Amino acid sequence: MAILDILHFPDPRLRNKAKPVSEVNERVRKLVDDMFETMYQAPGIGLAAIQVNAPLRVVTIDISEERNQPLTLINPEILEREGVEEMDEGCLSVPGIYEKVKRADRIRFRALGRDGNAYERDADGLLAVCIQHEIDHLDGKLFVDYLSNLKRQRIRKKLEKEARQAMPEPVGTVI
Ligand code: NI
């Protein structure tokens, strides 16, 4: 397994639309395993393949306290939405930022698991929010898109500044 690099907003690759997985083969299972390792290490409760620059419709989630309930969603689809929930959301691609976002409170969804078998289930609360957040990623959408332009610009500037400060000093001969 391997820890993958996570792209940060405003990286344009986060705006790619992910393609459906045509076959859950060894390559896809390796991606899933690497995503879990990356997500647990970060640490985060959800990760979409697009965040590690793999534009495929693959999502990993684990909302359990013990970090022992991995949930794999390949080609996920939301079948039903109900109610409204407003939660503070964060994102591994928008580090250090937490903002309120309104989403459906209960959903029914369908996906393929790591074994390639289709399953359908209901989710509510945090899990429902997390699934909606990750499926947004697959469509090139980020939670900051739900905020005002002003707020989004402010977050963009903050992260761009942090990225600049994290850059290593140029190495070379000073003459
Ligand atoms: Ni995210």
Image (cartoon, rainbow, N blue to C red):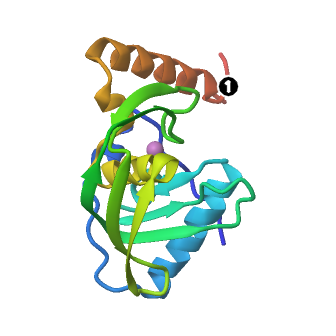
Q: Quadrant of residue 149?
A: top left
- The answer, for residue 115, to whether it is visible in the render is yes
Q: Is residue 118 above or below residue 56?
A: below
How many marks the image carries: the answer is: 1
Dot 1: element = loop
95 and 114: which is toward the camera: 114
Specify the quadrant that holds the N terminus.
bottom right
Q: Position of residue 4 (x, y in %)?
A: 58, 58
Other-residue count near label 1 (Cα within 10 Å), few / some / many at <14 / 14–19 / ≥20 = few
- The answer, for residue 3, to whether it is visible in the render is no
Q: Is residue 88 above or below residue 64?
A: above
Q: Is residue 142 above or below residue 111?
A: above
Q: Quadrant of residue 168?
A: top right
Q: Which residue is most to the front?
A: 83
Residue denoted by label 1: 173
> Residue at image x 43%, y 26%?
100
Seen in the image, is 73 located left or right of residue 56? right
165 and 57: which is toward the camera: 57
Q: Is residue 131 above or below residue 146?
A: below
Q: Position of residue 169 (x, y in %)?
A: 66, 25
125 and 51: which is toward the camera: 125
Q: Position of residue 56 (x, y in %)?
A: 34, 66
Specify the quadrant that holds the C terminus.
top right
Seen in the image, is 103 located left or right of residue 34? left
Mark 1 sits near ligand 1, with its Cβ under 8 Å away: no
> What's under tag 1, amino acid-wise?
Thr
